[in-house]
Every structure is written in structure tokens, then in C-alpha cells.
Amino acid sequence: MEIFIGYIILGLSLSAPIGPINAAQLDKGIRSGFWHAWFVGLGAICADILYMLLVYLGVIHLLDSPYIKTFLWLFGFLVLTYTGIESIKDAGHVSFSGSRREDNRLSKSLLSGFLMSLFNPLSILFWLGIYGSVLAKAAEEYPTQQLLLYSSGIVLGILLWDISMAGAASFFRKLLTNRVLKCLSVLSGLSLVGFGLYFGLEAARLLFLH
């Protein structure tokens, strides 16, 4: 049980650093409430599970090609920059009634989180480095059933973090005025654009310097 809890804590610590997903969750939580923020996180978890499976099956090395990496950086640049610009553009529409207006768009939040995480080359390096080493160590010590159990502990940790982020964003949304919410939405959008530009620079570096 202590080992399982350790893997949950690992999942929490892996999710904690501020990145595109956390910024997107804050933005969604501020603009549309808890459920939209959580669905961004759920979408990202789906991509994380996919990468965990690829690491487990040993095929993630196929994504190590410079051409594939360049494509992923470029696509990540497009997804993050577009999402950030949309957030800035829609900041004027942030209000406490926003969640009612967007109830039928939870699937869009889910897809947004999935694409952000899926086309994030840092996710590939992250899961290859972190989960790959965890998997290699655990495979030596535990049978396959326990390995899957501990992997689910990592996913549970990530899920708990996402729920916390969504809850925090929606909680602060209720405390702040519309004007402050709009400012925070713009800042979140600028953060996403910043991550997008970083991805774009990495793509350009791979294209022109290699």
C-alpha cells in the first residue's frame, strides 16, 4: 500500500510544474467553471495514458525521429498559439453566466486538453524519461499485475492534481470580479501563446539548424 501511495505522489509531483495544461485549466476554470477545467485535464490524461502505453510497448522510440519531432513541435505551436489567442479574444466575454452558455461544449475542452498533451514533444521526452525509468525499475522487482497497479497510481495522482486545479480555478472565479477575471483570462492566454512560441522556436531550430 505504501508503494502504491508513493506512485500516487509521483503522479501528483509530475503534474505540479506549471505548463500548457495547467495554464489551459486555469483559463477554462476562470472563464467557464469547474467542469470545463476538469475536462481539459481529462483530455490531457487520455494523451498521458496513450504515451504510457507506448512506453510500455516499447514503440515510443519511433517518435524520436527528427522529422516526427519537428511535426510535433509545429503542431504544438499551432494548437497552443490558437488556444491562447482565442482565450485573449474571448476575455471580454468572461462572466459568471459563461458556464451556462458553454455547457454543451465540454467535448471541446476535452479535445483541447488531449491535443495539447498529445502534440507536446515535452510529454514524449517526459514519459520516455520518467515513466520509462520507473517502468524499467519496477519491471525488475514486480510482476506485470503490480506494474499495472502502480501505473494506475501515477494516473490517479495526475487525476487528483487536475481535480485540484479545476477546483482552485472555479473557486477563485467565484471570489473575483468580472474585470479581474478578464485580466486573468488574458494572462492565461498570453501564457499559452508564450508556450506556443517556444514550441515554434524549437521547430525552427530543428528545421534550420540540423
Image (cartoon, rainbow, N blue to C red):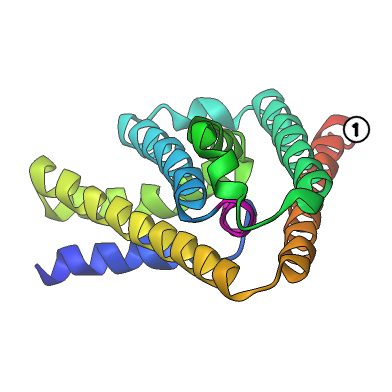
- Whether 137 is drawn above or below 90: the answer is below
- Whether 84 is drawn above or below 34: the answer is above
Where is the C terminus found, in terms of image quarters?
top right
Q: Nearer the viewer, residue 64 or 197?
A: 197
Please report the residue visible at 58 percent of the width from the left and 75 percent of the height from the top: 175
Residue placed under numbered mark 1 in the picture: 208
Q: Amino acid at mark 1?
A: Phe
Task: Look at the image and tell me whether residue 79 can be seen.
Answer: yes
Q: Nearer the viewer, residue 122 or 77?
A: 77
Residue 149 percent location from the top left of the image: 15, 49
Q: Nearer the viewer, residue 200 or 21?
A: 21
Residue 26 image-quadrant placement? bottom right
Residue 30 counted in the magenta span: yes
Magenta segment's dominant SS is helix
Badge 1 element: helix
Q: Nearer the viewer, residue 102 or 57?
A: 102
The residue stretch that appears in magenta: 21-32
